[in-house]
């Protein structure tokens, strides 16, 4: 996967401008490739031990081979992009320090906080979140953590959710030899996952239970999950997503035996701060950084790209947005102009 369109010979002369990119996922890497080719100095800060973000630590190898991604990252390094891994902004380094040090800062931290489910039994052994599973599997496969630190997967696995991450987990676990069942509260046609992924999962022997929602996790004598109790659903009027609202059918409870549960009910944006107002950067009620159409935030010189702006979307959307944001950053560094409607005094 190429992130840069130039090579060391065609790269433009140095502008002397310094840029910090927070997050080395698809959006951040795209911005890095575009801006290094334009002659700007680019430093990328990444919380994980290796660049790639979701491309490397969230999407399984069978769906996205890592060799091509790592080649693209090596090309960026050869062009002069500097990566500071194992460096979490807000913990290992303060955002304010970057704002003072760099001419522009691009926030590309994605959506790594998972939606939780508030039902009895959530604390049981064997109940995990999907990013916890996929990221730790990837970290283990790439030699960054021991296999004993990866969630223990049993032989009968239930996955709650209908998005791409649910399908990624299901297909990964199926390859580990487990029997896998996906429980989704609407019908197949309303699953947010790519249709090709759903079809592939069906062909691989993954089971689906539609129009059902979990209401509690049932424990065995040792405190490990042994079943998911669900209630059947029916589709009602459209909700805010435009899809029919799932409504429970009283008295329709049933149980699905299992020894492992994976929660894949959505991710939330993870900006590199607890209080954006401290830095003059506004977020909305869902925690998404507010930007204009070119990724400019409410603070002069600060841009944002990808899932931290839009909420969880596909890789192609982050890459497309990255190219738009890179153009806006370059324009700002060349002209110093910033729209007054965007800027907030800080």
Image (cartoon, rainbow, N blue to C red):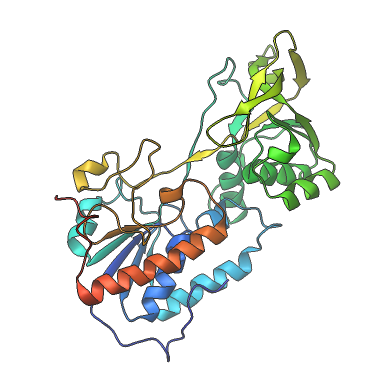
Q: Could you say which is closer to the camera, residue 203 or residue 259?
A: 203
Visible in this render: residue 17?
no
Query: Dividing the picture into quarters, in which one does residue 277 lie?
Result: top left
In the rendered image, residue 259, in percent from the top left (x then y), is placed at 72, 25
Q: Please tell me how many numbered marks the rendered image carries.
A: 0
Does any portion of residue 59 appear in the rendered image? yes
Give the left or right position of residue 324, taking residue 130 as reference. left
Quarter location, residue 333: bottom left
User: Split into 4 quadrants, where in the image is the N terminus?
Assistant: bottom right
- Point out the residue furthest to the top here: 251
**Residue drawn 55% across the image and 25% down it:** 117
Residue 295: image quadrant is bottom left
Name above or below for residue 324 compared with residue 215. Answer: below
Q: Of residues 99 and 307, which is closer to you in this image? A: 307
Residue 85, given in percent of the width and then of the height, sits at: 40, 58
- Report whether 22 appears left or right of 203: left
Residue in the image at 31% along x and 88% along y: 13
Percent position of residue 86, x then y: 40, 54
The residue at the far front in this view is: 237
Task: Tell me where residue 206 appears, x and y as whole percent.
Answer: 80, 39
Q: Is residue 70 left or right of residue 159?
A: left
């Amino acid at each position: 996967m190429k992130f840069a369109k130039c090579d060391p010979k065609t790269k433009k002369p140095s502008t002397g401008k310094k840029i910090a990119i927070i997050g080395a996922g698809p959006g951040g890497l795209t911005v890095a490739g575009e801006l290094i080719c334009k002659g700007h100095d680019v430093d990328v800060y990444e919380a994980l031990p290796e660049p790639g973000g979701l491309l490397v630590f969230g999407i399984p190898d069978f769906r996205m081979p890592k060799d091509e991604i790592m080649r693209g990252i090596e090309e960026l390094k050869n062009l002069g992009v500097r990566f500071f891994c194992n460096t979490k902004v807000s913990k290992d380094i303060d955002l304010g320090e970057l704002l003072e040090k760099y001419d522009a800062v691009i926030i590309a931290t994605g959506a790594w906080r998972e939606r939780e489910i508030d039902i009895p039994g959530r604390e049981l052994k064997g109940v995990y979140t999907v990013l916890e599973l996929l990221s730790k599997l990837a970290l283990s496969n790439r030699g960054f953590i021991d296999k004993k630190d990866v969630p223990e997967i049993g032989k009968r696995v239930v996955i709650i959710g209908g998005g791409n991450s649910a399908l990624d987990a299901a297909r990964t676990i199926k390859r580990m030899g487990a029997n896998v069942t996906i429980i989704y509260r609407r019908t197949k046609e309303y699953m947010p996952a790519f249709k090709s992924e759903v079809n592939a999962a069906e062909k691989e022997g993954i089971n689906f239970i539609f129009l059902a929602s979990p209401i509690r996790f049932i424990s065995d004598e040792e405190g490990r999950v042994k079943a998911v109790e669900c209630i059947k659903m029916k589709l009602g009027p459209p909700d805010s997503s435009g899809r029919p609202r799932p409504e429970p059918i009283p008295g329709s409870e049933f149980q699905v035996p299992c020894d492992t549960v994976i929660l894949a009910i959505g991710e939330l944006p993870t900006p590199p701060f607890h209080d954006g107002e401290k830095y003059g950067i506004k977020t909305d009620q869902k925690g998404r950084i507010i930007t204009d159409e070119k990724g400019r935030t409410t603070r002069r010189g600060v841009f944002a790209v990808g899932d931290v702006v839009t909420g969880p979307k596909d890789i192609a959307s982050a890459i497309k947005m990255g190219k738009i944001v890179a153009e806006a950053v370059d324009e700002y560094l060349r002209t110093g102009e910033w729209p007054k409607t965007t800027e907030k005094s800080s």
